[in-house]
């Protein structure tokens, strides 16, 4: 059969509240044009993230009932530990409430002020946690990574020449670890090849620096390797995943992605001494090392999810569905990051809206427009999220790219939902020249994209309840 179907049946449904364009205009203003501040019930199709949004399977829901909620040494922990060891292969498995908790503990223990952490590309919380301990986070992707239209089978790869150059320049003693993020989320959900991980491993070994994987989307990365890298077509995704982890000294993991769970994560290492320090810190902020901030039932759901995500029928369907979305909009002219990623399609908003300068946030403008058009929530990954500041003038420096990510939650939406998304994007694309930019009205010091307030640069006169002052700054009326 040519048609690839969802390899699951629906047992429980969650109704979607349908809204009108007028309703959405009102919700947008109430949320200060920040889609993170919308009430989720006012979103028709929620593509904000694939993190923690998966639909759990019947097997996961049944496993919840097995949850052993003992404070220490629960059966659920040992079941979870056995599954993680089986796939990831590390000796020490430390549960965490989510990925960023693993990052905070890892960097607090391994880094200090003046340390340098190279990564193919740091995810935003990873970068924030590195910087929080006074270390420097350095992104070293291959040059193709910053060219959205360029096709490359492993666009998530690390630039190994740049890595070696950095190690020589700052000295290995300042580099407590190297990280490789699989898949590389920040610019397209692009995979890293086994050959690249192997090369990074060789460099790390040469300089005595440990290698960690940010393993959030390990199964998707392994499936890309199976599809695209010579010599892997005949191997199972699980075998490929094991080979990836065998090259590393440890990993951080958010089970909210490829753990198919709604919460959870873990930190792994083969270094017992390091693990002891990490567990000491864990007790301080997360909980006892056999639950790490999670309920016993969460550990059960993760243990089942980690096995299910390796099912190749599932991965084949997921990739086909995401590719379908990408190909249908790209064929009509919408610029997307090529090739389509493992968990998301990324629209190149800077290319689609060239009349909006990066400091008027084309990604934010496009994300707002998709919501206005059809109630679709997406996520800006661009200047709002990743701008830097000139250290002399304090002026904002645009990010390298302005993208809008349409992340597809695991097992939640069907083909007709995807068709609806295609139709909405094409409608917005048709009227792209009429879309205006945005400015920031207020923002916090860290991770501003979550809570910043925005206003249109040129508010249309029909927007009631908004006024602007002589500098064209827009603010809400009381
Ligand atoms: C690559 C990557 N690393 C780390 C994280 C952080 O995980 P969490 O949201 O569970 O804290 C994310 C979350 O999206 C991610 O995509």
Image (cartoon, rainbow, N blue to C red):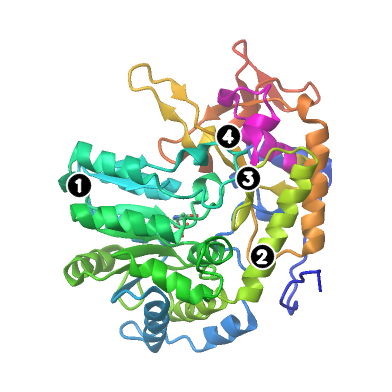
Residue that protrudes farthest toward the front in the picture: 231
In the image, is residue 350 part of the stretch drawn in magenta?
yes
For marks 4 and 1 on the same chain, the one whose residue lies earlier in the sequence: 1
User: What is the span of residues highlighted in magenta in the rendered image?
Assistant: 347-370
**Residue behind mark 2:** 318
Residue corresponding to mark 1:
112
Front-most of residues 62 and 386: 386
Q: In whole angstroms, how far apart are the C-alphas of marks 2 and 1? A: 40 Å
Q: Nearer the viewer, residue 365 or 322?
A: 322
User: What residue would you read off at disc 3?
Assistant: 338
First-in-chain label (4 vs 3): 3
Q: Quadrant of residue 316?
A: bottom right
| Screen quadrant of the C terminus | top right
Marks 2 & 1, CB-CB < 8 Å contact:
no
- Quarter of the figure with the N terminus: bottom right
Front label number (4 vs 1): 4
Q: Answer with mark 1 or mark 3, whichever residue precedes in sequence.
A: 1
Q: Determine whether the beta carbon of the residue marked 3 sits less than 8 angstroms from the nearest atom of ligand 1.
A: no
Judging depth in this view, the residue of 448 and 392 nearest the camera is 392
The crowd level at tag 4 (other Cα within 10 Å; few <14, some 14-19, many 20+) is many
């Amino acid at each position: 059969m040519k048609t690839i179907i969802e390899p699951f049946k629906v047992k429980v449904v969650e109704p979607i509240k349908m809204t009108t364009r007028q309703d959405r205009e009102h919700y947008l203003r109430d949320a200060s044009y920040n889609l993170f501040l919308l009430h989720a019930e006012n979103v028709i199709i929620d593509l904000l993230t694939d993190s923690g949004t998966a639909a759990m399977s019947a097997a996961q829901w049944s496993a919840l009932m097995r949850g052993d909620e003992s404070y220490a040494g629960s059966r659920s922990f040992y079941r979870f530990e056995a599954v993680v060891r089986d796939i990831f292969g590390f000796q020490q498995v430390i549960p965490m409430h989510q990925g960023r908790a693993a990052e905070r503990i890892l960097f607090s223990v391994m880094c200090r002020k003046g340390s340098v952490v190279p990564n193919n590309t740091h995810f935003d919380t990873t970068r924030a946690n590195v910087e929080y301990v006074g270390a420097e986070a350095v992104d070293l992707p291959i040059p193709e990574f910053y060219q959205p239209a360029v096709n490359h089978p492993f666009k998530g790869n690390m630039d190994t020449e740049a890595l070696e150059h950095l190690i020589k320049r700052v000295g290995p003693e300042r580099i407590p670890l190297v990280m490789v993020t699989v898949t590389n989320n920040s610019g397209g959900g692009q995979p890293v090849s086994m050959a690249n991980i192997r090369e990074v491993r060789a460099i790390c070994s040469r300089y005595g620096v440990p290698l960690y994987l940010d393993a959030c989307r390990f199964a998707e990365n392994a499936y890309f390797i199976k599809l695209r890298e010579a010599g892997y077509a005949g191997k199972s995704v699980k075998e490929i995943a094991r080979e990836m982890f065998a090259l590393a000294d440890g990993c951080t993991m958010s089970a909210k992605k490829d753990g198919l769970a709604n919460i959870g994560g873990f930190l792994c290492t083969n270094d017992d001494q390091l693990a002891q320090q990490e567990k000491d810190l864990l007790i301080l902020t997360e909980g006892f090392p056999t639950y790490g901030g999670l309920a016993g039932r969460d550990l059960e759901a993760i243990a089942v999810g980690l096995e299910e995500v390796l099912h190749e029928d599932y991965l084949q369907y997921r990739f086909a569905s995401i590719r379908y979305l990408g190909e249908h909009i790209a064929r009509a002219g919408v610029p997307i990051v090529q090739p389509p990623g493992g968990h998301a399609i990324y629209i190149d908003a800077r290319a689609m809206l060239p009349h909006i300068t990066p400091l008027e946030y084309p990604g934010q403008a496009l994300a707002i427009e998709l919501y206005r058009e059809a109630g679709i929530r997406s996520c800006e990954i661009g200047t709002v999220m990743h701008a830097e500041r000139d250290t002399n003038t304090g002026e904002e420096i645009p990010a390298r790219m302005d993208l809008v990510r349409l992340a597809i939650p695991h097992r939640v939406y069907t083909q007709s939902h995807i068709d609806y998304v295609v139709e909405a994007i094409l409608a917005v694309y048709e009227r792209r020249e009429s879309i205006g930019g945005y400015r920031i009205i207020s923002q916090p010091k860290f991770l501003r994209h979550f809570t910043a307030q925005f206003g249109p640069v040129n508010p249309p006169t029909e927007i009631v309840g908004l006024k602007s002052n002589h500098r064209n700054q827009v603010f809400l009326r009381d």
